[in-house]
Image (tube, rainbow, N blue to C red):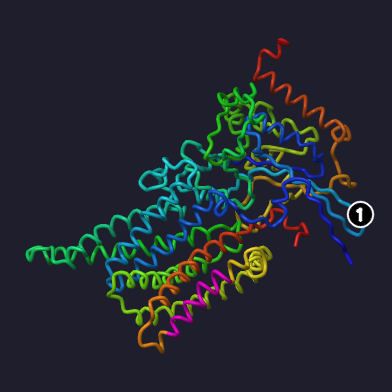
Amino acid sequence: MKYGMVIDLTKCSRCHACVAACRVEHFLPLRVTWVKLIAYETEDAGVVDVSTFPVRCNQCKEAPCVDVCPTGATQQRPDGIVQIEAKKCIGCRYCVIACPYQNRTFLSKELDPGYFPGHPKTRFEEKGKKLYPHQRGTTMKCNFCMERIDYGTAHNLKPGIDRDATPACVNTCQARALTFGDLDDPRSNVSKLIRERKPLQLQRELGTDPSVYYIDGIIGGKDNKAPIESQTGSHIQHLSSVEARAKEIFPELKQGK
Amino acid sequence: MEKHRQWITTHEWMVKPTAQTEWVDGQGLLIWLAEVFSALGMGLYLVALFLNNWWGQVAGWFIIVGLKLPFHFFYLGRPWRFWRAIPPFTSAWKTSWLARGMFFTIMYSGFALVQLITTYQLEHHLVGASSLGAVTALDWVMRLFAGFFMFLTGIYCGFAMSYCKSVPFWNTGMLPIVFVIMGLADGLGLVMGIGLITGGVDFHAIEAASRIFLLINAMLIATYLINASYQSITAEYSVKQLIVGRVAVGFWLGVVILGIVVPAVISIISLYAAELSPPLLVIAVISHTIGAFSLKYCVLKVGIYRPILSRVPVY
């Protein structure tokens, strides 16, 4: 079993909901993002094209970060997820340098000044310290929401199909641009997409064999297959998903306190 | 003509060739210093071992134990967990050059300490006749092991960097060789400095060796840069940054002029002078050392990541 993700760039509506969902899911410090959205525009002969690339840890099958880690803090699980065991990390930052995708972040004091520097921590931050503590002086990155996957598989749920076993960014994607599943299962949605759409892997020539695939495309072009409502309603979705998550964390919100 | 224009709205570091900062800026300066002292300590110790100069060996050992290791230690985000990177607490030495480097450095520190003690005892006739043979044998064994692990300590930094495919300029097997040869050339310079204080050093012999090492070093650096400029667009961009870009002053003044040309000129003067004047030797020692600092700084500074989306016209 190897988990992977297919990102359909022809559907991505650039709403940043995946970025926000990841922040909420993992209580990320202010200046840290595990999921990032590269957006750029190019102009060819007067025609402006806009492209977006949501990027996250590629969970490489031949991960350089695993090889360079001097303590074994970065490990690859049998299901292919590359995870960091924070209590083993010494903060040497060799993995940050070695990652060809620049998807690792060293959590320094500067990146974690609190959501409102100079003011008391928010309740969200306080909860995060208990529910999903991050250690300063160590390295962090996307882990495909492995806690959700572990929870789901323990309850006979199927990652990529059942929401409770699926990464938060995939769940929240209004445009359904993200597909998650088992790369080793030929019947899974990701395997089908890989077979049918021939997606690309970033910097494949480096031999890292990423588990994140991209179906290439240009937003706003004829090949944009995102539902039209997603292109206008993405921010509503984004806010509603944050609100739902907030209610999970703070039960008192449900009661309107 | 096709025109390209690009506006980066977020994370331009992923679509533009961006220099690494973790190992050279801010706290990363400690890594730079640690790497410099790795090269200087290795060069000095190995040259002093070859010339049988005890004070040089002591200075080389101190540079590694008293300077390199502390700089590495204080760089870590979680310094007190450093033991996790040392075998047998980790098995990562199979793949990680950093874990290997930790091991090499610790082994060197131990072997060299014993060797310094045995050599001191032998040189000052502090060993009784009955144990002279055993101590002499131990001294040779320790020299062998200390020298071996010192060499590995000096070369691992280069391998640690050259392993990174993310930084094409470093990603070549030539980097460790450049660092080792430069370290040995600088070691020759530092031994002259030791000789100026303690005496007992044949400056002419050292200058003769220095000429050879500097020539090899100059050729290696030139080959390295030519090779890198053919290797990939990003590596070529790094070379441009080094030669005419933002670190050009450091490269030409620090590495080329002070690190190679000035010591080379002084070593050529030594060919014709019966005795080298101390001020000239001091200049040679200082310029060697500045060259060592400059080389590592420049190489770390132009460590530029290849952009993730290489199809973006950025150059």
x 39%, y 69%: residue: B190
| Above/below status of B199 relative to A217 | below
Report the side of B133 relative to B82 (left or right). left
- Kind of element beneath mark 1: strand
Q: Residues within 10 Å of mark 1 (few under 14, many from 20)?
A: few
Report x, y in % for residue B177: 47, 69
Which residue occupies the extreme bottom position in the image? B272
Q: Is residue A66 magenta?
A: no
Asked if one can make out residue A57 in the rendered structure from this viewpoint, the answer is yes
Give the residue number, with chain letter if any, for mark 1: A47
Report x, y in % for residue B294: 53, 65
In this rendered view, identify the residue nearer to me: A164 or B180: B180
Report the side of B49 relative to A11 (left or right). left
x 61%, y 68%: residue: B249
Which residue occupies the extreme left position in the image? B130
| Above/below status of A163 relative to A48 | above
Report the magenta stretch's main SS: helix
Magenta residues, as a range?
B253-269
In this rendered view, identify the residue nearer to me: A117 or B158: A117
Q: Amino acid at mark 1?
A: Val
- The image quadrant of residue A154 is top right
Work out which quarter of the rendered image holds the C terminus of chain A and state it.
top right
- The image quadrant of residue A180 is top right
Report x, y in % for residue A187: 69, 39
Report x, y in % for residue A181: 67, 37
x 24%, y 58%: residue: B114
